Amino acid sequence: MSPLDLVTDHGQPVREDLGHLPLALRGVTVSYGAEPVVFSVDMSVAPGAMTAIIGPNGAGKSTLLKAALGVVKPLAGRVTAWGAPLASQRARIAYVPQRASVDWDFPTQVRDVVLMGLYRELGLLRRVRARHMDKVMACLDRVGMAEFADRQIGQLSGGQQQRVFLARALAQEADLYLLDEPFAGVDAATEAAIIAVLKSLRDEGKTVVAVHHDLSTVEAYFDRVFLINRRRMAEGPVAEAFTDETLRATYGGRLGDGLVARAG
Amino acid sequence: MLLDALTLQLGYNATLVAIGATMLGVAAGAVGAFLYLRKRALVSDAVSHATLPGLALAFLVLVALGGDGRLLPVLMLGSALSSWVGLWLVSWMGRATRLSEDAAIGAVLSVFFGFGIVLLTVIQTLSAGRQAGLEGFLLGSTAGMLRGDALLIAAGGALVLAATFVLRRPLLMIAFDEGHAEVQGLNVRALDLMLMTLVMAVTVVGLKIVGLILIVALLIIPPVAARFWTEDATTVALLSGLFGGLSGYAGAALSATAPDLPTGPIIVLMAFALFAASLFFAPSRGILAAALRHRRLQHRVHLRQGLLALAHGQPVYERLTQRMLRDHGLVRADGVATEAGRRAAAAALRDEARWQELRRADTLSELAPRDDGLTRIEEVLTRDQLAELDARLTPREAL
């Protein structure tokens, strides 16, 4: 942030200092067609915490994540990472996509997928050295997939594929991790393994943001929640922002089994 | 001269060519529409390139038998046969191996075309000078076209068009929902084969005028251009036929105005002109309309967010937001809200508060999905519902 922004001049606004936030959205509106999918959303992702993005289907969760990653261009508003434009901070942000977005028949092995996480380090021409492969194996080990390093990715189970994606994000050694439904369609063992890794990242001071749809595990897994239904419905620590009232406002009359499970 | 050409005043031959080209264009456009809707436009590329070896072989056979190598019906038959083989190879590769269709198309297209070019070279060395006509089949040439040829092309086009008309319903069914069509008792494979046969027929009929390299354009560009104007499949096919016919007619007429203008490329350029016009100017699907829509939405969003910022006493950062507020007379040049601005901001805030309360009201919360930030609540609720909502609001909110 340039010091100029801090000057008040004839009623011109003072820019809010967002430098301490790994990710901040201000007034972000996104539309794919005739109407906004996400309307005027403010989001402040707290550093060193795990945040769940929660909302019903079609509420704009993935769209919000895409706007936060700079993949879709907002109609209005701005996105900053550590107070700076997103583009300048890409190296510090890792992304784990939804499993469905990948061609699993693609001819590549597990270790090569993880190696792609090192692209920023390797660039176009640098040789892959032993230390790079060591890092790859360390990341695979961390998610419990080291013994699968030579498998073609299509031969893995859904949960294993998800762990490989997480390993690729780990290889990037980012400060902010964005995950789109990391627990969708994975087995219980994988879910436990992934959450353990994410918590260890948090304990190292990294920031984790995940789109999440299982309301019953929110309290056990996350520190903070961001409730969205086209607009920001609530945001804050789980104890304050994840309440019956905020959930009702977010899900409306269509409150499903999730809340029942949470209440019970 | 141009006017003469377009009104068919350039003589008997040019008129015949124009009629043939028009008929060909209509047929190609109509068949192309179904090909495009079936999402197999690329296959036509393999079909057309696979005609070349057959064309050359037919020529060689004719010459060997002592006849004129340029007898069009025989050349068309040879082309049809070899393109059949190519088509069969593409579908066989898809079934027998794990290759996807686009890879199979690429392989067949290039191998057949390469082989055809080799044969053309052989022909050139065998009978230097006499084969001048054969290259014309690559890009189309109407120079020295016989009356019989033109009639054959027109008749062939009409036949293809008639067959397409008869098959239009089952073809649309397999294009939209293969599974349903199959359950209805339609033979999907046979219908696909018939569609490909029609594509092949168009290719063969168009060899002389448009040439085998460019015929693909006449199959694909008209339906793509037509798609911009309509959301109805039958209309796509009709418009596509019209666009194809117009391109064929205007292209043939234009190329007749000068001695060395190649017919095929000019027809394709005409088709492209129609496509470009559609791309830009079509209502609703055209890019001009889309850009205008996007801009209007963006302005509404910025105006609304600006008003809400005013209402909350927050500063407005974005230039566009500032400009929208100023242009609507809601803030003065120095950024201070005008009287109208304060009123509009208060109204926006009330609207927001109502939407928020609507989510808490059990009887109304199912309307919450209508809240997209821009829709005014008065457009969604009846007067009674609004009164009910305001009754809930008054104790807590004092605006």
Image (tube, coloured by chain):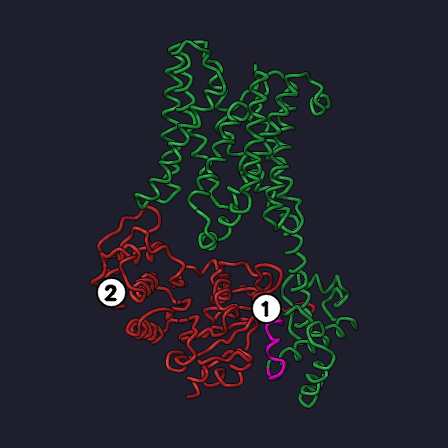
| Foreground pick, B128 / A32 | B128
Residue type at tag 2: Met
Residue A100: percent from the left, percent from the top? 39, 61
Q: Compare marks 2 and 1 and give the one earlier in the sequence.
A: 1
Residue B106 badge: none
Q: Nearer the viewer, residue A63 or B98?
A: B98
Chain letter of the green region: B
User: For the view shown, which residue lies furthest in the right direction?
Assistant: B339
Residue drawn 22% across the image and 54% down it: A130
Residue located at (43% from left, 42% from top):
B190
Q: Which mark is residue A145?
A: 2
Q: Which chain is red?
A: A
Nearer to me, A48 or B168? B168
Label 1: chain letter: A
Q: Amino acid at mark 1?
A: Phe
Q: Report if residue B367 lies within the magenta region.
A: yes
Residue at disc 1, secondary structure: strand
Q: Residue furthest front?
A: B185
Residue B123: where, in percent of width, then height? 39, 14
Q: Is residue A164 visible?
A: yes
Furthest-bottom residue in this view: B395
Q: Position of residue A106 (x, y in %)?
A: 32, 52
Marking on residue A39: 1
Residue B286 versus residue B105 in the image, above or below: below
Residue B268 visible in the snapshot? no
Give yes or no for residue B246 being in the magenta stretch. no
